[in-house]
Amino acid sequence: MAKITPEERTRQRQEREESQARMEVVREARYAQGYRRHRAWEALEDRLRDLVPRALDVLERALDENADPKQAVPVALAVLRAGGLQGLERPAEPNRALLAYEEVDPDLEETGGDGREGRPETGL
């Protein structure tokens, strides 16, 4: 068996450390990409849910005014279904103790938490 010199051992250790560092960079990049996708999907879900009150208004008008339901009602119902209204859960009551431990991004706080300024609360 060949004896490993101290220089060779040091080089092997450095190569392992460099390899581990590269793998960590890749893991972090994959996490960041997955997180961005997740946040983008959440934003799309929020936008869709924001349409629910308007769809309800259309449905209400169609019922109240005897409007032609052949066009307005199916569209309103499709939006309600797509918005997941049947599975929509009531938002949890805020808990100050839990909020104290939540990470906060000051930039998002200024825009209402979703990155879009001036977006009215829908209550959903």
Image: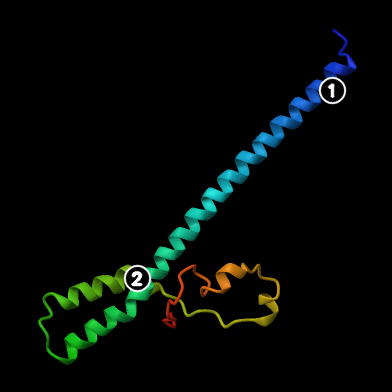
Looking at the image, the residue that sits furthest to the bottom is 64
- Please tell me which residue is depicted at 64% across the width and 81% down the height of the picture: 95
> Which dot, 2 or 1, sits closer to the camera?
1
The residue under label 1 is which amino acid type?
Answer: Thr
User: Which quadrant holds residue 83?
Assistant: bottom left
Work out how far the residue at label 2 is from the one at label 1, CA to CA, in angstroms.
Answer: 59 Å
Give percent across and percent down for residue 105: 61, 67
* Image position of 14 (left or right of 113): right
- Please tell me which residue is depicted at 80% across the width and 21% down the height of the picture: 11
Quick one: quadrant of the C terminus?
bottom left
Quick one: quadrant of the N terminus?
top right
- Give the residue at mark 1: 10
* Image position of 28 (left or right of 53): right
User: Which quadrant holds residue 116?
Assistant: bottom left
Vertical relation: 97 (above or below) 2: below
- Give the residue at mark 2: 83
The residue under label 2 is which amino acid type?
Answer: Gly
Numbered disc 2: secondary structure: loop
Give percent across and percent down for residue 107: 58, 68
Q: Of residues 92 and 38, which is closer to you in this image?
A: 38
- Please tell me which residue is depicted at 84% across the width and 20% down the height of the picture: 9
Other residues around mark 2 within 10 Å, as few (<14) / some (14–19) / many (≥20): many
Give percent across and percent down for residue 106: 62, 70
Other residues around mark 1 within 10 Å, as few (<14) / some (14–19) / many (≥20): few
Numbered disc 1: secondary structure: helix
- Please tell me which residue is depicted at 40% across the width and 66% down the height of the picture: 45
Vertical relation: 41 (above or below) 96: above
